[in-house]
Amino acid sequence: MAPVIAEGAQFAEVPAAVGIISAFGLVFTVSLFAWICCQRKSAKSNKTPPYKFVHMLKGVDIYPESLTNKKKFGADEKTELAKSTPSPASAKTALHLDLEKRDLNGNFAKPHPRVRSSPELDMPSPHGCFPEEGKEPASPESVPSSKALTPADKPPDREAGLGTLFFSLEYNFDKKAFIVNIKEAHGLSAMDEQSLTSDPYVKMTILPDKKYKVKTRVLRKTLDPAFDETFSFYGIPYSRVPELALHFMVLSFDRFSRDDVIGEALVPLAGVDLSEGRVLMTREIIKRNVRRCVGRGELLLSLCYQSTTSTLTVVVLKARHLPKTEASSLSDPYVKVNLYQGRKRVCKKKTHVKKSSPNPVFNELFVFDIPPETGLGDTSVELLLLDSDRLARNQVIGRLLLGANAEGTVGEHWREICDHPRRQIAKWHTLSEG
């Protein structure tokens, strides 16, 4: 009987050992998981939040999550100003000088970068729908940041002008960031007829992608607002900056209805050199161009000619401002594409129908074979924008003809794809009556 008892005791020790090992394994796993979480949290806190831009108000970075709490930005400046109680004018000047010593993170560190005026202030706008008046270059002394101008320093009033916008441009090569500082505006139009003032703020959009849209805070009861707000846009290569344009929209806040539009300004960046430091610029605020294409609408096309394969690629992207039908209802548009060799139609294709859409988005690609011996010389493309109707004949909304004999922007578009093969070129075109 003794050997049987010893063997039973050995079997009883096995579950106990397994339980002890499992407990140690569980403790080790929990500890490892907690350590990994702490490491990730600490690493995440050291990184810059993944936002498209950093908004710096009065020298302090503002991220979206910090706008919901009740932190008081610029506490250091208020503390320093409280110690020495100067006059209001001198306090404002001291605050401005203090902010100029800060970098993008709000710290006192590096010397201020080189500042120069822009020689391209009278550069004409390439966009026809944004006319711009001539303006003489402004020196750095004539473009202050936040200090209000005295009556002697204010620009002369112009009957056609709606005010002047002051801003600066800069590119940070270390952080690969395009930086725009909206400084101030002067001589704005009064939107409030009773108080003869406005509550202005500025909306800014980077064209042509319209991916970056920002706006300043609202300043109450003033026609000479001093915003002094900085917007940093990351992920924009320096080589792409000349291809961009800044669109400023100056508005007046209205609590009870839609905000009033004071005016706008368009600033192409094609001739602005940011390699040597910050550039101070000024633009006259002009009346908003509310002109729409009241005719047949507009169509956005992308064309590409492959000379090696003798193919023409036509991408029907989208349309806008389409007119209503006779029944005063929205149309069901689609695009029909016809390829002609001389006067003979050799191929036809069409997009899908977009139901009840005045601004349809198609994004459909068509590839046509072109005779290699003639190329695009005897080729033309006709695009018909039609309204789909199951009960009656489809009505032609607008027509567009592309070819070597076309005039205006259509002819320019065709010549560009001929001169630059293998390049995809997109342009808006106004439709004519079918």
Image (tube, rainbow, N blue to C red):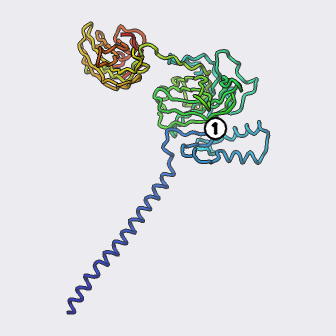
Position of the N terminus by quadrant: bottom left
Question: Which of these two is toward me, 332 or 128?
Answer: 332
Where is residue 93? Give x, y as percent. Answer: 73, 37
Question: Which of these two is toward me, 306 or 204?
Answer: 204
Classify residue 355 as left or right of residue 188. left
Question: Which of these two is toward me, 313 or 345?
Answer: 345
Where is residue 197? Give x, y as percent. Answer: 69, 26
Q: Which residue is mark 1?
A: 112
- Identified by mark 1, the residue type is His
Classify residue 151 as left or right of residue 34. right
Position of the C terminus by quadrant: top left
Q: Residue furthest bottom?
A: 1
Where is residue 368? Give x, y as percent. Answer: 26, 19
Element type at mark 1? loop
Picture layout, residue 194 above or below residue 134: below
Classify residue 421 as left or right of residue 202. left
Picture layout, residue 176 above or below residue 298: below
Residue shown at 60% from the left, 16% from the top: 133
**Numbered disc total:** 1
Where is residue 174? Give x, y as percent. Answer: 52, 40
Residue 410 falls in image quadrant: top left
